[in-house]
Image: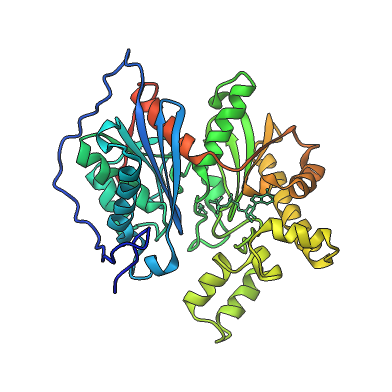
Amino acid sequence: MGIGGRNGGPQTRYNPIPLPARRPVSSKFEGEGAKSILILAVNPGSTSTKIAAYQDELCLWKEVIEHSAQELQPFARISDQSSYRIEKIQEVLREKGQKLEVFAAIVGRGGLLKPLPGGTYLVDEYLAAQCQNAPGGEHASNLGAIIAFHLGQRIKAPAYIVDPVAVDEMEAVARLSGLPELPRLSQGHALNMKAVARKVARQLGKAYHEVNLVVAHLGSGISVTPHRRGLMIDVNNANMEGPFSVERCGTLPAALLVKLCYSGRYSETEMLKKILKEGGLYAYLGTKDAREAERRMQEGDARAKLVLEALAYQAAKEIGAMTTVLLGEVDRIILTGGLAHSEFITGEICRRVSFLAPVEIIPGEEEMESLVLGALRVLRKEEEALVYRA
Ligand SMILES: Nc1ncnc2c1ncn2[C@@H]1O[C@H](COP(=O)(O)OP(=O)(O)OP(=O)(O)O)[C@@H](O)[C@H]1O
Ligand SMILES: CCCC(=O)O
């Protein structure tokens, strides 16, 4: 089966690209004293690939390449989409007259690797192959390393990923769930949360490792993390626990969930879809768009109001819980992600948590910039690139 081109162009079948033989990666960055660094950032999401060109911290351009369900349908696994998405990226570069060779580095969003500390990782052949095999599960972010690696190899520039979804800096005590077979797993929006944490630390005139923060990323999924002196020492797994979001269930009553799984009404795949894609706001209101839910609330829809209140209530409760992890020593609580645009939701959360610490609201996410800043820290030798080995 073929797939449509971005502009309705010729139908082409894309196959997973074989990994090339290991080649030494030479950076075009000339080291200290070099004036400016061009970086290409690649952020693959489930239905889009965001790309951006940066000159140092300055964004030169950003593009969102949308992928329709029909285009993605031929790929059995998400990691099989890499050569298709690379072709789409190249189309955009061609349209812009932007040569790949000018970039000193390619940086991609990092995905569900084995648990690993936060930081900027060099994408070598091993890491790219690991993402191809999706050891921690299929997730569009796994494509970030694969795409960055292949683009980097083409131009002999280094490829990096920064603070991937699998960042795990949890303390031992946070790992116990109550059942030894089911340890708690650290999966969340590490890239954006660490970026806003660094930003707020800077505003306070301190380094990230000098402050204690509770960061709540309120997006399609919700992650709430206590950051103790630069480490995310706990997190509600954004796919499995914590507050419900616009599409995910978060924590569910365990025994009732078991009963539903064995009711014969749903297959395993259907249950997973139900809790990850069709839960939360969507399950109650039939929309994943919080703006739509707010519009209904303003028109007098009591159910929409209750569900939005409950979402904020659960997020606030999780923030409260994470302040106990920091023994109440919290410099700032930070609300970020798409839902932090909502004055109703942030207002409801602030009402419940502002007695704990001052609250900063940083709506949306700055993932592209965060990727680039992570690569720049390494290229400027402020940080060493980490090497991933499972
Ligand atoms: N101005 C706004 N007011 C209220 N809600 C908003 C606003 N802008 C975006 N949202 C809501 O934010 C939610 C999506 O958040 P976001 O864009 O952070 O998610 P995502 O990037 O798809 O996923 P994730 O952040 O989990 O990676 C949607 O429900 C959307 O309606
Ligand atoms: C698993 C958390 C990251 C995401 O939802 O994108």
In percent of width and height, residue 190 lies at 51, 43
70, 169: nearer the viewer: 70
Q: Residue at x 38, y 66 (%)?
A: 71
- Residue 63 in sight here: yes
Q: Residue at x 31, y 39 (%)?
A: 97
Please state the horizontal and vertical placement of residue 350, each as a whole percent of the image: 78, 42
**Quarter-of-image position of residue 193:** top right
Judge left or right: residue 107 versus residue 320. left
Residue 330 makes an appearance in the image: no
Looking at the picture, tell me which residue is in the foreground, 188 or 95: 95
Q: Which colour scheme appears in the figure? A: rainbow
| Image x and y of residue 247, in percent | 60, 63
- Extreme residue in the bottom direction: 264
Going 21% across and 37% down the picture, which residue do you hit? 155
Q: Is residue 297 above or below residue 260?
A: above
Which residue sits at x=70%, y=51%? 315
- How many circles with numbers are drawn on the protein? 0
| Vertical relation: 58 (above or below) 112 | above
Q: Residue furthest top?
A: 33
Residue 145 x/y as whole percent: 33, 46
Which image quarter is the N terminus in? bottom left
